[in-house]
Amino acid sequence: MSANIAYFDCPAGIAGDMCLGALVSAGVPIEYLSEVLARLTIGHEVKLRAELVHRNGQQATKVHVDLLGETGLETDFKHGHHRHLPEIEQIIRQANLSPQTEARSLAIFRQLAIAEGSVHGIPPEQVHFHEVGALDAIADIVCTCAGLDWLGVEQVYCSALPVGGGFALCEHGKLPVPVPAVLKLWEMHEVPVFSNGIEKELVTPTGAAIAVTLSKKFGAPPEIEIKKIGLGAGSHDLEIPNILRLWLGKKSKSEKRSKKKQKRSRS
């Protein structure tokens, strides 16, 4: 498949596992992502698995990131490790990833640290990562970047994001949705948002960080020739299909012609 532009279409929001599901649905082998995960020093603690599920009658790919204890048994992610930014950056740098995957992964975690630090009033390096720093988030972010690299994606765009509503249970207690880190990331990057009427947490800190760090622009899709669509399922059933839609394509011929005309007119 020849495609170098990706568009995250997020009518039901975005989360790390939804990104992975959309990438696997679009053709990235789960075995490849597992190999990338194995390069991390945490690789023996997590494993990936994919399955086809239905959300409001539509089939999509759900990727699970399972945490393994010392015995090799699956354990609850809520009891996963907490890490500071320098340790996470070291894990990524030592993994022998491609330059693009490493750079994107580091940038995403840096944005998370800046947002969390701003919320708590401390420098990014001192942020004690909770949900966003757990093993599943490291796997989500690094494997998302690796999957985009595998597909040859050079430019990423994203739709406006749904605000959600209600409250989310976090390590700090019950927080209003959007949770503070997500709201700060939106403020930092002037993200366009909308309400789809669903009172749930629709955009996670990991999902927000992936979107704001990688996206060249938010809003309507770019003018592209669509080559492939990947459908990544969220964990819960909602009033609408809980699916992240990944559009993959190349610049349209009409856009190429328009740019050529602009160049000729300037010369």
Image (tube, rainbow, N blue to C red):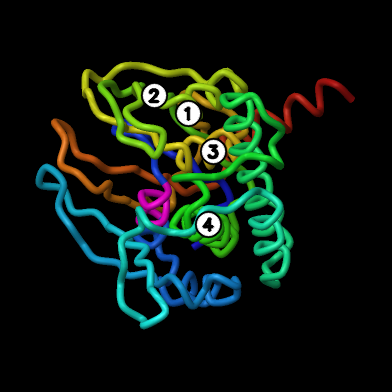
Asked whether the beta carbons under mark 4 and mark 2 sit within 8 Å of each other, the answer is no
Camera-nearest residue between 45 and 162: 45
Residue at the spot of label 3: 209
Residue at the spot of label 1: 182
Q: Assign a secondary structure to mark 1.
A: helix
Residue at the spot of label 2: 178
Residue at 71%, 42% (x, y): give it: 125
Q: Distance between the residues labelled 2 and 3?
A: 13 Å
Sequence order check, earlier mark of 2 and 3: 2
Residue at 41%, 33% (x, y): give it: 172
Residue at 50%, 29% (x, y): give it: 181
Q: Position of residue 36 (x, y in %)?
A: 55, 72
User: Does residue 251 appear left or right of residue 58 in this picture?
Assistant: right
Q: Give the range drawn in magenta.
A: 16-22
Give the farthest residue toward the left. Answer: 57
Asked whether the beta carbons under mark 2 and mark 1 sit within 8 Å of each other, the answer is yes
**Other-residue count near label 1 (Cα within 10 Å), few / some / many at <14 / 14–19 / ≥20:** many
Sequence order check, earlier mark of 1 and 4: 4
